[in-house]
Image (cartoon, rainbow, N blue to C red):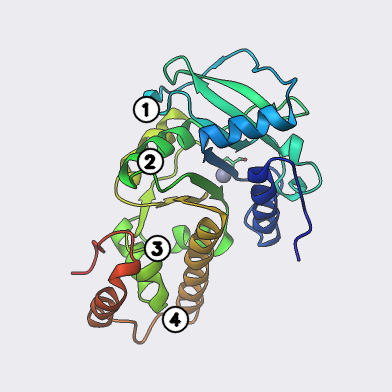
Amino acid sequence: MNSFTHPISFVKEAAPLAHMCWSMGWNEANGGNFSWRLPRDEITAILARHYPDLAPAEPVAMPIDAPDLEGEIFLVTGSGQFFRHALEKPNQVFGIVQTVQGGTAWRKLWGFSSGAQPTSEFATHLAAHAIRKRVSGGRERMILHCHPPEFIALSFLMPLESRALTRALWEKMPECIVIFPDGVRVVPLLLPGTVEIAEASAAELERSRVISWSHHGIFASEENPDKIFALVETVEKASAIHRRVLSAGGARQVIDTKMLCQLTEKFGALMVAKPEFLD
Ligand code: 2HA
Ligand code: ZN
């Protein structure tokens, strides 16, 4: 049972998620990052109630403009922080920041007690939030980047191609096409923490919630902690099965297109999008 508590309800939910990601082996050391676009009125009221003396810090310029996110407030992991420490030191691992000055800067509202800044991937997170907020009609609020080993292994074994990777995963477990009908989109190996990786990811995020950063990790968008964990967990499970099948010499049969179409028909109401790689 989780007995962790925190005056900020969003930290109360995010810290156990981060710790669980570490225990799954997805976020070693300072690897990976997380951000959550918070409901503005609710977080403003919580901060006013529990931290009445806190004043917003000076704005810091961002390497990317996010005009569509002007004024939005994010709970975000700090650069250099360990997911393993999330329960023990939540006020250090996490911070709450607001985008200001037309989405060209951020300012700290709470947290980062050791002086950290938002994750080195914050520019990509913001680009992703802007796109996924629009594409999902505001439903998606959370971005998780982590390093799940089976998923990463596939980027050494398979073509770096969205269709091939998506089909390989869909064909290994019936749940996959239901849970990620929008597929997994592949971004080539790019330097982490750059505007280049943000722009390459943004293009793919127009069509999918799940991105493969080749030879590096996964980048995913969803609504809440349960849904984002379930999404990454399912992709990683299917990746593990596929990697075992490859290690054993390859598949003799798979879940075929006919069955994938039947799954789509039966579970269409649960799917966030119409599957694209079904032909
Ligand atoms: O260390 O994972 O992508 C943080 C990262 C960079
Ligand atoms: Zn990473």
144 relative to 182, above or below = above
Determine the CA span between mark 2 and mark 1. 9 Å
Circle 3: element type: loop
The residue under the point 77% across, 29% down is 113
Q: How much space separates mark 3 and mark 2, taking CA atoms?
A: 31 Å
**SS category of the residue bearing label 4:** loop
Q: Is residue 148 above or below residue 192?
A: below
* Circle 2/circle 1 CB separation < 8 Å: yes
Contact between marks 1 and 3 (CB within 8 A): the answer is no
For label 3, count other residues whose C-alpha is less than 10 Å away and answer few (under 14), some (14-19) or many (20+): few
| Quarter of the image with the C terminus in it | bottom left
Q: Amino acid at mark 4?
A: Gly
Label 4 or label 1, whichever comes before in sequence order: 1
Q: Nearer the viewer, residue 183 or 89?
A: 89
The quarter of the picture where residue 49 lies is top right
Residue corresponding to mark 3: 158
The label number, if any, that marks residue 133 in the structure image: 2
Indicate the secondary structure of the residue bearing disc 1: helix
- Provide the residue designation for mark 1: 68
Residue 79 visible to an observer of this rendering: no
Q: Earlier in the sequence, mark 2 or mark 1?
A: 1
Within the image, what quadrant is residue 273 found in? bottom left
Q: Residues within 10 Å of mark 4 (few under 14, many from 20)?
A: few
Q: Amino acid at mark 2?
A: Lys
Single out the mark in the foreground, 3 or 2.
Answer: 2
Q: Earlier in the sequence, mark 3 or mark 2?
A: 2
| Mark 1 residue type | Asp
At horizontal 58% and vertical 43% (from top left) the residue drawn is 34
| Position of residue 205 in the picture relative to residue 193 (left or right) | left
State the residue at coordinates (75%, 36%). Answer: 91
- Kindly identify the residue that appears in the image at 41 percent across and 25 percent down: 66
1 vs 3, front mark: 1
